[in-house]
Image (tube, rainbow, N blue to C red):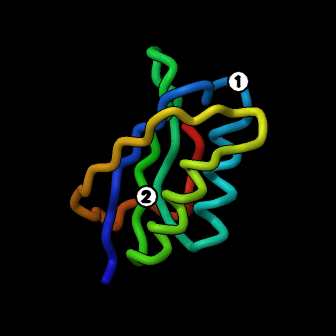
Amino acid sequence: MRVARKFLVSGQVQGVGFRFFAQDAARRDGLSGHVSNHADGTVEAVAEGEAEALDRFERALRRGPSRSRVERVLVDGVEPTGLHAGFEIR
């Protein structure tokens, strides 16, 4: 069953390759969606795919790349749209 989740990641997550890290993690699990920086210093990712793949993606976001310091990850379920092809950085 295809599901979708929105992740809002805070901490030292900009300027450390976090979006590229998230894109790689999403692609490894066949997820579609996007990741982007917000002006407040957070990173938002919206991903669609199988629930187990999204669980793995969340664990990767909570770990982050080596130069990051993830303080919090807020997760919200959203309706899958099926509109994304691949996983892009915005």
Residue 10 location, x and y as percent?
48, 30
Single out the mark in the foreground, 1 or 2: 1
**Left or right of 46, for residue 67:** right
Kind of residue at disc 1: Gly
| Crowdedness near tag 1: few (<14), some (14–19) or many (≥20) residues, C-alpha within 10 Å | few
Residue 25 location, x and y as percent?
64, 60
Instruction: Please tell me whether residue 8 is drawn above or below residue 29 in the rendered image.
Output: above
Considering depth in this image, is 21 or 33 the residue closer to the camera? 21
The Cα–Cα distance between marks 1 and 2, rounded to whole angstroms, is 21 Å
Q: Residue at left 64%, top 32%? A: 69
Locate the C terminus by quadrant. top right
Identify residue for label 2.
Answer: 47
Considering depth in this image, is 86 or 17 the residue closer to the camera? 17
**Left or right of 38, for residue 24:** right
Locate the N terminus by quadrant. bottom left
Identify residue for label 1.
Answer: 15
Residue 72 location, x and y as percent?
45, 36
Q: Residue 52 appears in which quarter of the rendering? A: bottom left
Kind of residue at disc 2: Ala
Residue 86 location, x and y as percent?
55, 63
| Crowdedness near tag 2: few (<14), some (14–19) or many (≥20) residues, C-alpha within 10 Å | many
